Amino acid sequence: MSENEALPPQNIKNNPKIMKAWALYDWANSVYSLVITSTIFPIYYSILTTASEKSEYVKETGQWIKVPVRHMITIFGKEYQPDAIYGYSLTISFLIVVLLSPFLSSLADTIGNKKSFLQFFCYLGATSCMGLAMFTGMENVFLGLLFSITASVGFWGSLVFYNSFLPDIATPDKQDALSAKGYVYGYLGSVVLVIICLLLIQVFAKDAEQAKMYTRISFLLTGAWWFAFAQYTFKHLPQFGNIKEQLPKDLVLLNYKNIFKKHEEQGGVWEVLKDNVYFYVEIGRQSFRELFKVGKTLFADRNLKFFLSSFFFYSVGMQTIFLMATLFGKSEINLEQDRLILTLLLIQIEAIIGALVFSRLSRRIGNKNVISIAIVLWIVACLSAYFLNKENPNVEYQFYGIAAIIGLVMGGLQAMSRSTYSKLLPENSMDNTTFFSFYDVLEKIAIIIGTFIFATMIEKYHNMRYAALSMTLFFTIGLILIRFLKLKVTTENKAV
């Protein structure tokens, strides 16, 4: 039990140590987001799925350019583009999260141990990152994709419970700053680790084979970083939840020690197992009923209806572009590995500035206007990506310009979305895990749709430009919907 387990709710709210512990989980887990999702793993995947490079002559510039020739991946006798398969694998991972999170969040609220679920998904993600070190080539590409899926489930699954702590530990006037602080810690931590990994791959590696070896070591370091730094969060974060009395005789699946008991005092093994099966089945039924009930309740509120609708549509574009950006730079314009990693590293640093600037700007013009500005900039980035032409001699600098826009708005929009939703929820509610489960399920459904559309567009047109263009539609709808949000401005900065 942590030192904060027994603290009453009034001592949990705005407690500096607890808020710091919460924010530092971003420092721990964001290395997955940068190393595995954004930079090193997508580049490594692209290299291992590239068979060779061919030269093509560009008449307009009079120059020869290198174009990668990819290994096709065969599934059930049909060949697919490797980038499309990567997109579909992300779709699968988010589908798993969507199916699990309502059940698990309901279970966490029932038992009152959402910190335990946060720990489980943290450890799943961290060990999966380490498992990626076993991905060495096309002969075990499906193993790499499997660990990529489970790492994604671990990361996004943990965020369901992590985000739900925000209204538990901070009052509305503190939530914007705390949410932004978490993202800043995350960007800083991930930048530190990427610099270490970049030194290993670019400086210490003497040839291509050593670079691959150090890349796999980077995956081990990512998992170890996530696991180790999360311990500070788990030590100080309270086991916060609405504990109910009607529990099974022994929670067998959640306490492995109970599996091997004879359970004589509880009526025997079969009685306990039957009690557990009924309990978990009933939790499953209640969780999805509760999810729909919560959705109906949330959408009955005018502001929550327009915010969540807007959030859904712009999340389709924002999260999909974020997940596929590295493969875009590698596959579309064949940007060199060191330049691509450096670009993405600078994006993270810029995102720190963006999160802080957007947080402060929200105090002046409100969250609604800040979110609107961010969406407009995302639309500009998508349109610019569509008009990129790899035959243009300045295409590399154009890509850098798009990356600069994304870096500015990425952290700001994520932080403002989380804090805006948190402030719109009923204050002092005991159902925050369920509320944030709905929020996360909505986001994951958006990602499922986005990654599926993106992967399908790649498979159909054999490039990502049309896929990027399709995302502008979702951003535009999100922009229109967010403008219907209406809240009063107060002196305590509670308005959005």
Image (cartoon, rainbow, N blue to C red):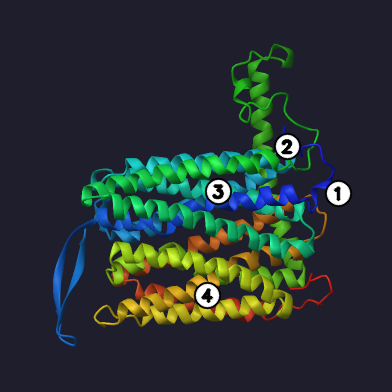
53, 426: nearer the viewer:
53
Classify residue 496 as left or right of residue 384. right
At horizontal 60% and vertical 39% (from top left) the residue drawn is 231
Instruction: Answer with mark 4 or mark 2, whichever residue precedes in sequence.
Output: 2
Q: Residues within 10 Å of mark 1 (few under 14, many from 20)?
A: few
Write down the residue under mark 2. 111
Q: Which residue is mark 1?
A: 10
Q: Alpha carbon of mark 3 to alpha carbon of mark 1: how far? A: 27 Å
Find residue 60 and report its image quarter: bottom left
The disc labelled 3 sits on which kind of residue? Ala
Q: Nearer the viewer, residue 324 or 224?
A: 224
* Element carrying mark 3: helix
Earlier residue among tags 4 and 1:
1
Instruction: Pick the quarter of the image with the C terminus.
Output: bottom right
Q: Residue at x 63, y 73 (%)?
A: 358
Instruction: Assess whether mark 1 and mark 4 are in contact (beta carbons under 8 angstroms).
Output: no
**What residue does disc 3 label?**
28
| Numbered tag placed on residue 474 in the rendering | 4
Q: Pointer 2 and pointer 3: residues touching (CB < 8 Å)?
A: no
How dense is the environment of label 2, judged by Cα within 10 Å: few (below 14), some, or many (20 and up)? some
- In the rendered structure, which disc, 2 or 3, sits on the residue that comes first in sequence? 3
How crowded pointer 3 is (Cα within 10 Å; few <14, some 14-19, many 20+) is rated as many
